[in-house]
Amino acid sequence: MTDEVPKGSEPETSESLKAFGEVVKAFRKRAGLTQEQFAPLVGYSVPMVASIEQGRRLPSKEFVDRAEEVLDAFGVIQAAAKHLTRKAGLAKWFEGWAELEPLAVTLYTYENRLVPGLLQTPSYARTLFEKQIPAVSDDKIESNLIRRMERARILSERPETIFSFIVEEHALRRQMAGPAAMREEIDHILTLGERRNVDIQLMPQSRGHHSGLDGPLYLLETEENTWYAYCEGQETGQLISDPKVVSILQQRYARMRTQALSPEESVSLLREIRGAL
């Protein structure tokens, strides 16, 4: 299983995102800069700049302000940014975190409910969308699926980002999508875990108390070395920027990494779970 978006599933965008990208491109070319020259001036990677110019990524406020300054754009870039609309297929409470994900240089994820979205295969994700309550239309399911697969592309587009995943063992043992789909899902996770920048650890069922019992936890560090956290419940989510709170959650995640199985032990357990399907 690869990270490619399924055939016919191009990432969703909006006309405002495309228009913003064209504005940035026009001012970049006016300044006589290539993407390779422009990217370090604004403090972002070349793939990120390319994605924004193509209308595939929602730019951060930092990118907008830096691009405005570097390109001396007469306020046009900042004005264009005010009219941007986000991509479809995301819960409102998740949008803030989704904007930060593509900017991460470090991304930590702990999940105790199901396979994290960034690790899901199309089959696994589709089952979640098809069985959710309240039910949604086929078009909405396809929209959600496309967006989730597009999010997962950061695992291949950000080879220098450090990704760490801690997943409860029972989330892999739950046959969310049937034996064949779960075997495919586990194979996908095993493949991703072979990457140098991806660590996948299972929290074994035999582990009693551990530091993640308060629920799912997401942490990330931006290119400006600013840390954020995100916690989610049913129909709600909270983006956390308070350094004191983020520090507490970092401590919990660090402890969980010592309480979970090592990546090598996790591979063995994943293969055991797969063999039992």
Image (cartoon, rainbow, N blue to C red):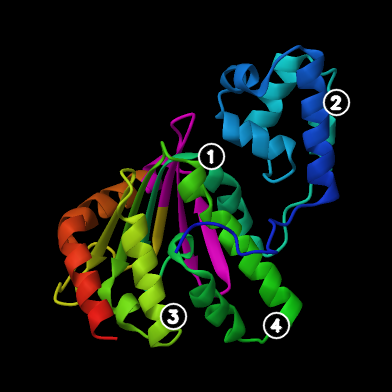
Neighbour tally class for label 1: few under 14, some 14-19, many 20 plus, Cα within 10 Å: many
Q: Nearer the viewer, mark 3 or mark 1?
A: 3
| Residue at numbered disc 4 | 136
Q: What amino acid is labelled 1 in the image? A: Leu
Between marks 1 and 4, how big is the CA–CA gap? Answer: 30 Å
Q: Nearer the viewer, mark 3 or mark 2?
A: 3
- The foreground one among 160 and 43 is 160
Q: What amino acid is labelled 4 in the image? A: Val
Q: Residue at x 26, y 74 (%)?
A: 169
Q: Position of residue 184 (x, y in %)?
A: 40, 74
In the rendering, which numbered label is found on residue 76? Answer: 2
In the rendering, which numbered label is found on residue 59? Answer: none
- Helix, strand or loop at label 3? It is helix
Which mark is first along the chain, 4 or 1?
Answer: 1
- Helix, strand or loop at label 2? It is helix
In the rendered view, would you say 149 is above or below 240? below
Q: Nearer the viewer, mark 2 or mark 4?
A: 4
Which mark is first along the chain, 4 or 3?
Answer: 4
Q: Give the extent of the magenta segment.
A: 219-246
